[in-house]
Image (tube, rainbow, N blue to C red):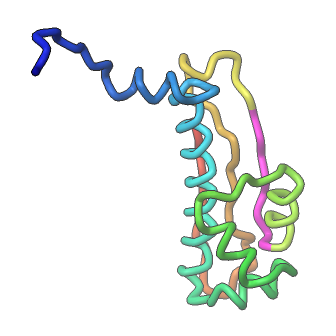
Amino acid sequence: MMSDKKVELKNTLDFLNDLCDEPLESITELYDILYDISTRIYDYRKSRGWSQKKLADILGVSQAMVSKLESGEYNFSIELLWKISKKLGWNLIISFGCNVHDQPYSVIDYWENQENSRGNVDFDLAVG
């Protein structure tokens, strides 16, 4: 026998927020930052025609580590970002604003060293 009761379902975002320890918006913001950094590393490597193994050799890490760095799911430490920037000739700049919702802020900006034999190509990453 079916009941005549109506059940009101929550919207998907409210449902997911109830399941998470942090608001989903905060979690997705972090993943967006990690994805942006990973994409820049991937784009840099591909623009030079390098394999993951070649980039791994330059960075002094394993090919499996480069795969993790490019996956978008690796949580970079400041130290690792600094090491990557030094080995690739990038500048690493980290800044925080007063209110990230009022104005854009830059988590990382880097660009290629001017000594690149393939020409000058800028790689910038603004997250916020």
Quadrant for residue 7, please give it. Answer: top left
Query: Residue reaching furthest front?
Result: 1
Q: Nearer the viewer, residue 64 or 85?
A: 64
Q: Where residue 125 appears, x then y in whole percent?
A: 60, 51
Image position of 119 with respect to 54: above or below:
above
In the rendered structure, which segment of residues is drawn in magenta?
88-95
Relative depth, front residue between 8 and 115? 8
Residue in the foreground of this view, choosing between 72 and 117: 72
State which quadrant residue 39 falls in. Answer: bottom right
Picture residue at 82% right of the left edge, 78% below the top? 59
For the C terminus, the image quarter is top right
Please, which residue is most extreme toward the top here? 5
Left or right: where 51 falls relative to 85: left
Q: Percent from the top left, x then y, of residue 26?
A: 58, 29
Q: Is residue 86 magenta?
A: no
Q: Residue at x 81, y 83 (%)?
A: 58
- In the image, taking residue 44 as reference, residue 16 lies left or right, namely left
Number of marks in the rendered image: 0
Could you tell me residue 25's position as x and y percent? Answer: 51, 28
Q: Quadrant of residue 117?
A: bottom right
Image side of residue 119 versus residue 97, left or right: left
Image: 116 above or below 3: below
Residue 76: give x, y in percent of width and height.
76, 54
Residue shown at 68% from the left, 62% from the top: 111
Name the magenta segment's main secondary structure.
loop
Relative to 118, is 13 above or below?
A: above
Q: Quadrant of the N terminus?
A: top left
As for residue 91 lying within the magenta part, the answer is yes
